[in-house]
């Protein structure tokens, strides 16, 4: 039997992907954290397990909207090669797909690059908006604003719907838009009931051997989504979030050129960031993170 390391086929900012053969992949979420498209040298403890556990939570609850690639992640669901203790709770067995070449971004609030676009053009990725909107305001309707997929170390680029349609075809584009907005609406409603605003998020989708659309990769995690506590929300600012903004804010205080190698993170920033990730997991799922670790056999 080959060693798992021999089956590595791709390494991203956070995830390592292994091809197990037979149409199955193993996605392993590490504790790496990136900021300004640079992977930092300091890991965030259990971050990868938070991402994996939250992805499972959402995949289990969105199958009525679109099928997904998950085959299992509990130890009993994984092949022997994937049962090493260090993989517990962070490895997901998945179907292999042909991934589509666009990031499916949905924005429910005017913030981030969408806010910058609006201030310059009065629109977001080609979607014209009313004048006079404030930063972080809720949009009249969720917007589908696709982007390109960039290689590690490069920026994704926002593109128009017409540009995205030219990459995947008009019918597939319409399907991506419909599914992505349905996923966002479902998740935003759940999150709000838990005292959290889902400001925006991005999805990755692929095509299976029958040509059906399938949801893949991480889903509605603090790395792929902007979550705000409802009790701290107001317009006119970029509200505090559960994602890695805490790390970005620290890095902005440094004389660092935002190029590799990144600086080490101090203990208080590591602890604060890890706590925000766990808090997001518990608020969204309604379950303790410790119970997830126990279920996954993490010791």
Image: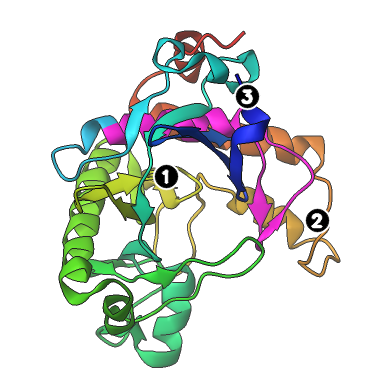
Q: Which residue is mark 2?
A: 262
* SS under mark 1: loop
Give x and y (percent) for residue 46: 61, 27
> What crowding class fits label 1: few (fewer than 14 Cα within 10 Å), some (14-19), or many (20 or more)?
some
Q: Which residue is mark 1?
A: 217
The quarter of the picture where the C terminus appears is: top right
* SS under mark 2: loop
Residue drawn at x 57%, y 33% is 48
Residue bounds of the magenta highlight? 31-59
- Upstream in the sequence, badge 2 or badge 3? 3
* SS under mark 3: loop
**Mark 2 against mark 3, which lies toward the viewer?**
3
Horizontally, residue 135 falls left or right of residue 213, namely: right
> What crowding class fits label 3: few (fewer than 14 Cα within 10 Å), some (14-19), or many (20 or more)?
few
Above/below status of 247 relative to 30: below
Task: Name the residue nearer the viewer: 227 or 103.
Answer: 103
Give x and y (percent) for residue 1: 60, 19
**Mark 3 against mark 1, which lies toward the viewer?**
3
Per the rendering, the mark at residue 2 is 3
């Amino acid at each position: 039997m080959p060693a798992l390391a021999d089956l590595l086929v791709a390494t991203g900012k956070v995830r390592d992907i292994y091809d197990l053969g037979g149409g199955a992949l193993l996605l392993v979420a590490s504790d790496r954290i990136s900021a300004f498209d640079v992977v930092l040298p300091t890991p965030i403890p259990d971050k990868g397990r938070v991402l994996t556990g939250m992805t499972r939570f959402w995949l289990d609850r969105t199958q009525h909207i679109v099928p997904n690639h998950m085959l299992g992640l509990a130890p009993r669901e994984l092949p022997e090669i994937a049962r090493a203790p260090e993989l517990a709770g962070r490895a997901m067995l998945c179907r292999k797909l042909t991934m589509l070449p666009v990031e499916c971004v949905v924005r429910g609030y005017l913030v981030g690059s969408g806010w910058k676009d609006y201030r310059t053009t009065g629109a977001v990725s080609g979607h014209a908006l009313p004048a006079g909107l404030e930063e972080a305001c809720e949009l009249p309707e969720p917007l589908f604003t696709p982007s390109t997929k960039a290689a590690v170390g490069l920026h994704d680029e926002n593109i128009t719907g017409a540009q995205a349609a030219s990459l995947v075809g008009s019918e597939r584009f319409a399907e991506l838009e419909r599914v992505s907005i349905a996923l966002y609406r479902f998740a935003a409603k759940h999150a709000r009931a838990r005292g959290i605003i889902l400001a925006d998020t991005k999805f990755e989708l692929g095509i299976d051997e029958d040509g059906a659309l399938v949801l893949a990769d991480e889903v509605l995690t603090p790395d792929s989504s902007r979550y705000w506590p409802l009790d701290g929300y107001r317009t006119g600012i970029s509200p505090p979030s559960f994602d890695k903004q805490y790390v970005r804010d620290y890095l902005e205080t440094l004389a660092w050129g935002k190029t590799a190698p990144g600086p080490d993170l101090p203990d208080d920033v590591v602890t604060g960031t890890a706590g925000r990730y766990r808090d997001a997991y518990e608020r969204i799922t309604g379950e303790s993170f410790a119970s997830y670790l126990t279920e996954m056999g993490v010791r």
